[in-house]
Amino acid sequence: MTLKNQNHSLENNSRREFIIKGTMLGGGLVLGIGAIPDALAQAGAYYDPNTPTKYGEAEVNAWVSIKPDDTVLIRIARSEMGQGTRTGLAQLVTEELECNWKKVKTQSATPGQSLARKRVWGEHGTGGSRGIRTSEDYVRRGAAAARIMLLQAAADQWKVPVSELTVDKGVITHVPTGRKTTYGKVAELASTLNPPDPKSITLRNPREWKVAGQPYARLDTANKVNGSKVYGVDLQFPGMLCASVKSCPVFGGKLASYDEAKIQNMRGVKGVVKVNDSTLAVVADTWWHANAALKALPIAWDEGKGAATSQADINKMLRDGLDEQGDFWQRKVGDAPQVINTSAKKVEAIYFTPFRAHVTMEPMNATVKITGNRAEAWVPTQNGEGSHAALSEATGIPLENCEVYKLDSGCGLGRRGSTQDFVTYAAKVAQKYPGVPVKVIWSREEDMTHDYYHPIAMAKMTAGLDTAGNVTGMHIKVAGQSINATLAPSAIKDGKDERQLQGFYEKGPDAQLGYTFPTLLTEYVMKNTLVPVGPWRGVNTNQNGIFMECFMDECAKAAGQDPVKFRRAVMQSHPKHLGVLDAVAKKAEWDKPLPAGTFRGVAQFMGYASYSACVAEVTVQNNVVKVNRLVFALNSGHVVNPYLTREQIEGSVAMALGAIFLPEISVEKGRIKEQNLDTYPLLKLASTPRIETVLVPTYDFWGGVGEPTICVVGPAVANAVSAAIGRPVRNFPLSKEGLSLA
């Protein structure tokens, strides 16, 4: 299946112009500020299992409720943050349920409800491109079970064998007599039946899908366009208080003192809350009043030893790590160093990738209300159960007395998943104001300077070539910061952290190296800093894709071979990797000459159980790079919605190009130097190239689509740039190489 790029002409209006023009169209633009959660509940945003017929629907099972008018309410446990998971899961349910897509609406299952029902909805986390691929089976089986129960209910009502019934778009037909009924009319009876054994159900062949697999429009677009969607920062309750937070600017530093008296008479201020040893919150009637008072609050910090740390110190530590000798190996095939040193030609390169911030469109926030021994939170989160646990831990209130209402996130990118500091802060502040909802919002500066950043890393890549240009050995040595050291220390075994070598594994369901070398050694030297790190879209396939694929081009050049042909020679035992490489080369017409001054680069990698490849076309004039075209091939096994898949690939382009060209996050005197978008800008629309995608699903596995392609954009573009300027580029962002993006 091929998706053709569509070019859209967009007027570059300012936000103010957009709002002014929007209010003149269709009677007005509603920005969503002022809406209260009860309105959301009536719209089906929240579902209460204790009153399943509150809105007139009958619950057939945990996944499906149906109203008398045939409206189908599909319950979704995963979070939605713009990636389309809600729409994709709804398509899978609709496919097995055989209901009418035009009658489908979704509801958000909460972690509290799930706990009360023995985790009937399974995992609530949405990260690692797992939103669909790790829940598709039980979601589809739940939908198929509901279909079986609805058909059985109709058969019981008519007193006929269920084998005589068919269903199409929620209309049940008794074939011998032509009698018809609808799901809405039999749903209540179906809800009383015993469900079938899910394991006994045969699911539909994906090659024969009618709803799933189709490029349906998203279910969550309208309220984004008309401004009625309520994000966490928009949320309003009667009597709500707001808070702004500030942590010690130096990582590892602590609060020494503050003078609350200086701000107690400022407009709207209610008080100051010490959240922890390094964080304060000012509470007021509005967030603007809270933030203004926080800026005026005299605070003295004990900056600690971290204040002496600079970016140069960190970079030197990494560079020294590449020369360290020790038990750092994680994969060995033969004696690669020995073979490389005795080969006809030795190729060596050192690459660097920096810290990166998430810069989610919506800064971190959460709203918490504590009443007696009951805690409730309204959170834009990637991990409902994680937020649930954080709420309970912060307040000391048992899990069963806590509830989290998941709001759609204005961007997640990994920041709202395994780290839940925004929930903890809100809970701590709300404890000081019992019975009152308190909304805590981080300023953009606080959000950028207290992120869990993409980990910094260096890699020393060494290869041996024989006289014919064949690879004899490959040595991959990475020195960098460990995400697990920050977030999951127990995952580090014997000082070794496999997670940081994501994409270099021999075999793995999520990531593996797509090349077979006669000898191979992979090593990881852990070098942790005071800067907290965490998952950032693509996690470690980002830098590892750059290290591997840029170096493969350097090896191809040293061997005097075409980069695609050079890769093919060591990919014969990796058919899926080879499949996307061949597909992208064909789509990009790799063997066709380019106009003078235009150059190509290629990359392939595997991450998040999907195989991806990219060809970039660039021009470079006066060290200014213009990325003209990007062509992708993706094999995610199955494609639930090709339109949403294409959207995700385009989103990965924006992040990846920004990461390799725009300013890095750096440390100065123990603190983050870049504090807002003036010093850490995002990619502009004008810099976005033409994007083409070919999907090559093989229908034999389930892969993700949100993150896999981000790891091939950077190296494909870098390889094209290297071809254009006649030398390799190894330091990112490419401003370090004297290059900028047009």
Image (cartoon, rainbow, N blue to C red):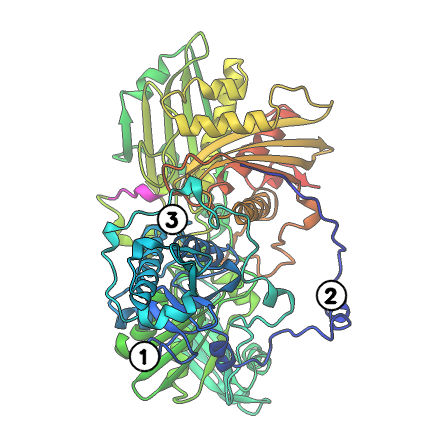
| Tag nearer the camera, 2 or 1 | 1
Q: What's the residue at 33%, 47% (across, down)?
A: 203
> Which mark, by number, is residue 18?
2
Vertical side of 305 occupied by 136: above or below: above
Secondary structure found at label 1: loop
Going by the numbered disc 2, the residue's amino acid type is: Phe
State yes or no: residue 498 in magenta: yes
Q: Position of residue 510 (x, y in %)?
A: 35, 41
Name the residue beneath numbered marker 3.
Answer: 133
How packed mark 3 is, by other alpha carbons closer than 10 Å (few <14, some 14-19, many 20 or more), is: many
Q: Quadrant of the C terminus?
A: top right
Q: Position of residue 189 (x, y in %)?
A: 32, 71
Q: What's the residue at 26%, 67% (across, down)?
A: 193
> Which mark is first along the chain, 2 or 3?
2
Vertical side of 441 occupied by 451: above or below: above
Kindly report the distance in space between the C-alpha atoms of the residues bearing marks 3 and 2: 37 Å
